[in-house]
């Protein structure tokens, strides 16, 4: 067996499945039963397991289990309270072994604000017109996005919001949990994070 990895939240299991195929011993956790059904349909095995749960309260049996925890593709900042975000980081630290690594990927508040668009729209391949309207609250850090669409397959609208963080604030959350950020990258590029990076990937180690 390879290193033990937690993919959290794992969604449909696209990362978990690939990691297991490459020899890692993988646990995936997500709150959505529907997404976990899709993940399990891709296949499970001795080195790939899925668990339904809340990432603010990971299973007690996982304490000190993992060599790495992955939190990828903007899977952070959706809780109403910032305290919940800190609790997620605390849980990631708890389940890591000493010297274990957290890989965090998501939006960078500095870069998103540097390139902020209040609204935009585009047409998809099937002719559906899609529009986004955005508002940002600098006090709470919440970016609210309202989406509308109209096309051959129907029309609709929805909204969601996410709390955006700067790299320095995320590093502080990690430090509070005993994690030290070692590297900060411009999204998935092999270059350092800069002030106009809209995405960032942080690598932190448990002391």
Image: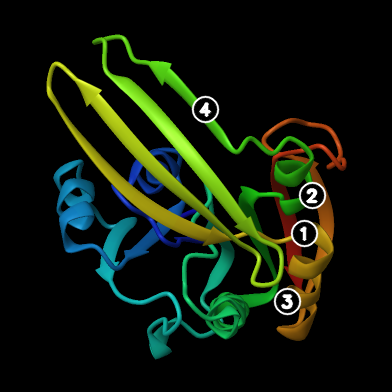
Which residue is identified by label 3? 173
Precedes in sequence: disc 1 or disc 4: 4
x%, y% of residue 121?
Answer: 46, 23
Is 120 placed above or below 3 here? Answer: above
Based on the displayed image, in which of its 4 quarters is residue 25 positioned? Answer: bottom left
Viewer-proximal residue among 182 and 86: 86
Precedes in sequence: disc 3 or disc 1: 1
Whole-angstrom CA distance, mark 1 to mark 4, is: 24 Å
Which residue is identified by label 1? 166
Tell me the element at label 4.
strand
Rendered residue at 47%/48% (across/down): 145
Whole-angstrom CA distance, mark 2 to mark 3, is: 17 Å
Whether residues under marks 1 and 2 lie with C-beta atoms below 8 angstroms apart, the answer is yes
Viewer-proximal residue among 47 and 91: 91
Precedes in sequence: disc 4 or disc 2: 2
Whole-angstrom CA distance, mark 4 to mark 3, is: 33 Å
Quadrant the C terminus occupies: bottom right
In the figure, is residue 65 to the left or right of 178? left
Whole-angstrom CA distance, mark 4 to mark 2, is: 20 Å
- For the question of whether residue 207 can be seen, the reply is no
Precedes in sequence: disc 4 or disc 3: 4
Q: Which numbered marker is on residue 120? A: 4
Q: Residue furthest bottom?
A: 60
Which residue is identified by label 2? 110
- Way the structure is coloured: rainbow
x%, y% of residue 99?
Answer: 73, 71
């Amino acid at each position: 067996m390879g290193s033990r990895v937690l993919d959290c939240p794992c969604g449909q299991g696209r990362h978990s499945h690939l990691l297991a195929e490459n020899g890692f011993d993988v646990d995936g956790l997500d709150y959505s039963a529907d997404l976990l059904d899709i993940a399990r349909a891709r296949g499970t095995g001795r080195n790939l397991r899925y668990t339904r749960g809340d990432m603010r309260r990971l299973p007690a049996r996982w304490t000190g289990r993992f060599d790495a925890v992955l939190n990828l593709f903007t899977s952070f900042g959706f809780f109403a309270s910032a305290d919940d975000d800190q609790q997620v980081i605390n849980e990631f630290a708890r389940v890591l072994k000493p010297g274990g690594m957290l890989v965090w990927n998501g939006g960078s508040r500095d870069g998103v604000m540097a390139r902020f668009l209040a609204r935009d729209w585009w047409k998809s391949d099937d002719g559906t017109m899609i529009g986004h309207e955005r508002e940002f609250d600098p006090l709470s850090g919440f970016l609210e996005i309202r989406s509308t669409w109209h096309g051959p397959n129907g029309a609709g609208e929805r909204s969601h919001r996410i709390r955006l963080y700067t790299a320095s604030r995320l590093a502080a959350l990690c430090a509070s949990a005993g994690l030290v950020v070692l590297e900060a990258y411009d999204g998935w590029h092999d270059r350092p994070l800069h002030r106009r990076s809209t995405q960032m990937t942080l690598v932190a180690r448990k002391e």
